[in-house]
Image: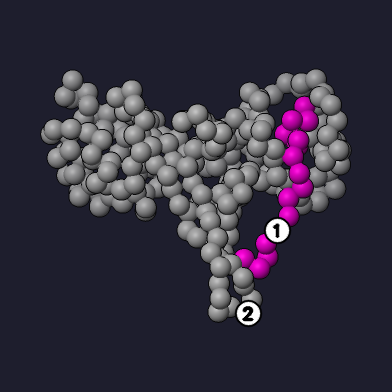
């Protein structure tokens, strides 16, 4: 990636400028964020999606794509964390500025910042095939714990809000039944057979499972056209 002109200095990025100049050129966009730290050590579990681990990935900031970066996604605060080593081999974590992020990828998990219903833009995991596109917004919440000395709260499992763009409309769904209700006629029966054959569950489905479902739906639509 070619070097870009420097923007106004960000005081939070000053200590990282030499690192960024060597690794990413003179563009300071990648570090226009805040030093990350664990805010709630008394909370049980973790806020990250899909797990508490860094993934090799990419991030697009205001149209500029940075690849070969290590990222993890805090789905409780809806923030993206960058892991890096500075010139002194010091280990650092940086919370990137959400207003600058267009999209990012964590391994096989691809996210875009979108506004589907005129709301403030949020991050959606995106899956696409020829005829359909699926959007999933992931969020972890917290619940209080009354019988623990060490912890005051616990993070929930990832909670997904699902949408499907099909037939020039965006449909919401929560499970297999409401997903099938988006379609009509014989398509419902074929989708039901697919779910049974694949032992499919949206709660347990990984990226490959969702993508394969969309490919199946596209093939089904095209066969009935």
Give percent across and percent down for residue 178: 27, 43
In the rendered view of the protein, which quadrant contains the N terminus? top right
Give percent across and percent down for residue 205: 36, 49
In the image, what residue occupies the spot 70% across and 38% down? 97
Q: How many marks?
A: 2
Would residue 37 be found to the left or right of residue 201 on screen?
A: right
Question: Of callouts 2 and 1, which one flags the residue occurring earlier in the amino acid sequence?
Answer: 1
Would residue 87 be found to the left or right of residue 151 on screen?
A: right
- Most foreground residue, 32 or 177: 177
Q: Which mark is residue 174?
A: none
Q: Which mark is residue 149?
A: 2
Please say if 96 is above or below 3: below
Check disc 1 and report its element: helix, strand or loop: loop
For label 2, the crowd category at 10 Å Cα-Cα, with few meaning under 14, some 14 to 19 and many 20 or more, is few
Please identify the residue farthest to the front as the structure is shown.
Answer: 118
Cα distance in 3D space between marks 2 and 1: 19 Å
Give percent across and percent down for residue 62: 66, 25
In the image, what residue occupies the spot 82% across and 41% down? 12
In the image, what residue occupies the spot 35% across and 38% down? 172
Magenta stretch holds residue 34: yes
Using the rendered image of the protein, determine whether residue 112 is visible from the camera's viewpoint.
no
Please say if 191 is above or below 43: above
In the picture, residue 53 is in which quadrant?
bottom right
In the image, what residue occupies the spot 26% across and 35% down? 182
Would residue 203 be found to the left or right of residue 32 on screen?
A: left
- What is the span of residues highlighted in magenta in the rendered image? 27-43
In the rendered view of the protein, which quadrant contains the C terminus? top left
Q: Which mark is residue 39?
A: 1
- Most foreground residue, 73 or 178: 178
Give percent across and percent down for residue 60: 62, 30
In the picture, residue 128 is in which quadrant?
top left
Magenta stretch holds residue 139: no
């Amino acid at each position: 990636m070619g070097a870009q002109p420097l923007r106004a200095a960000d005081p939070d990025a000053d200590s990282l400028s030499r690192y960024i100049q060597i690794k990413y050129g003179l563009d300071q966009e990648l570090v226009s964020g805040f030093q990350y730290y664990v805010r709630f050590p008394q909370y049980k579990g973790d806020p990250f999606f899909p797990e508490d681990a860094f993934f090799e990935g990419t991030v697009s900031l205001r149209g500029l794509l940075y690849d070969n970066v290590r990222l993890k996604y805090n789905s409780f605060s809806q923030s993206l964390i960058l892991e890096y080593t500075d010139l002194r081999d010091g280990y650092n974590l940086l919370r990137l500025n959400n207003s600058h992020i267009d999209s990012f990828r964590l391994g096989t998990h691809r996210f875009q910042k979108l506004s589907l219903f005129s709301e403030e833009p949020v991050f959606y995991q995106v899956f696409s095939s020829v005829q359909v596109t699926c959007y999933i917004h992931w969020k972890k919440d917290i619940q209080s714990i009354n019988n623990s000395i060490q912890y005051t709260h616990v993070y929930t499992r990832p909670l997904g809000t699902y949408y499907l763009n099909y037939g020039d409309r965006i449909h919401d769904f929560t499970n297999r039944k409401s997903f099938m209700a988006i379609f009509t006629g014989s398509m419902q029966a074929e989708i039901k057979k697919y779910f049974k054959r694949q032992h499919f569950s949206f709660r347990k489905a990984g990226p490959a499972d969702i993508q394969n479902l969309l490919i199946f739906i596209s093939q089904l639509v095209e066969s009935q056209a």
